[in-house]
Image (tube, rainbow, N blue to C red):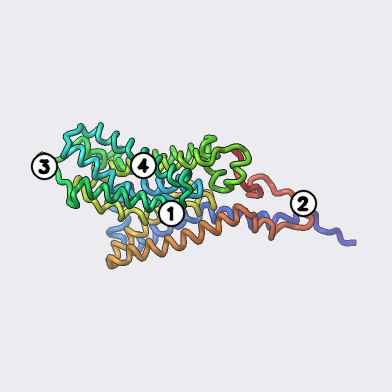
Amino acid sequence: MTTPPSSSTSPSRPHRRRAAGHLVGAYGLPALTVVLFLVFSLVLPRTFPTRDTVDSILSTQSIPAVLALAATVPIVTGAFDLSLGYGLGLAHVMVLQLVVNEGWPWPWACLAVIAGGAVVGVLNGVVVEFGRIDSFIATLGTGSMMYAVTGWVTGGGRIVPGPQGLPSAFTDLYDSRFLGLPVPAFYVLVLAVALWLVLQRLPLGRYLYVVGSNPRAAELVGIPIRRYTVYAFTASGLIVGFAGVLLAAQQQIGNPSVGLDYLLPAFVGALLGSTAIQPGRPNALGTLVAVAVLAVGLTGIGQLGADFWTIPLFYGGTLLLAVGLAGYSARRLRTGADAARDAPAPPAPPPPGSGGTTGTAP
């Protein structure tokens, strides 16, 4: 008489498939970054795999990376802050206005602008939660108002320093190097690690994830949804203020319209990042990886001599792909559809680490 296969071995194949799918979802984007770098290095061996290219990527992509991390925090709670680009423009103009036209010492000007960014974040959160206005509409409205304030401060023109220029200590915030690398790269790294620790290791971050994944459940367990959403917008505004300081140190001229160019890259990075490291959940390290993919891709395309219109085409297509993948990953995380489809009969408990549990407990 033939002995049927043991029930302890029958679920091994579905579990292996799920584990392989999890690995691809979590680490596919970092692998894509490596593949893109290798491909461009082979196609452009004289210009791409060089120290100058690496330095350029680390330096020029620092501000988009900071802004993408700022966009990530409200997305954790299920909200979107469309005022990021307008806030960036206002912040960098205000730094130069205070230093050049008002004669403030640059450290105080920077601190004032960063604190002002936090205040703007609080206002955004209050409008969204206590005004009961959709975050898209609310932040688009507040962003438009910030753009108006930027135009009022600058009179529609640029803020240009005098012949003596800006203090070298201020411009060194962006231009200096540390351990042989551009110092803005270390700002991004420290910020990403700090956000990762807050979101993954502290109760505050867990509460934010619960608010974003299931507001009703958060309410039932006693999490004050409105307060934590305001916290998320406040953190976003604080980071935007810091990005404005970096942009002022980089540009050294106050341009009232420059911030809008960073809005689309920020959301592409944040949404694409939610498909990596922890698929289905916006996370800081995933955002960092997404920005790296975009930076390598754009740098390679630029060195190939592509036309200027390829950049918005690249960002637009990547945004659509990111939204689709993020939605798919979130549905898988919420419903466990793959696990239900592959489950054997009778069902066996999933092994530890297979992704069989969903949700986050505060």
Q: Residue at x 50, y 61 (%)?
A: 324
Closer to the chain start, of discs 1 and 4, is 4
3 or 4: tag closer to the N-terminus: 4
The residue beneath circle 2 is 8
How far is the residue under mark 3 from the one under mark 1? 40 Å
Q: Nearer the viewer, mark 1 or mark 2?
A: 1
Disc 1: which residue: 136
Q: Position of residue 283 (x, y in %)?
A: 48, 46
| Furthest residue toward front | 131
Between circles 3 and 4, the one closer to the viewer is 4
Q: Report the front residue among 15 and 328.
A: 328
Q: Looking at the picture, which amino acid does disc 2 mark?
A: Ser
Residue 253 spot, x, y in % from top left? 19, 47
Q: Secondary structure at mark 3?
A: loop
- Give the residue type at disc 4: Val
* Kind of element beneath mark 4: helix
Mark 4 sits on what residue? 120
Q: Which residue is mark 3?
A: 162
Residue at 42% across / 61% down in the picture?
318
Left or right side of 327 for 167: left
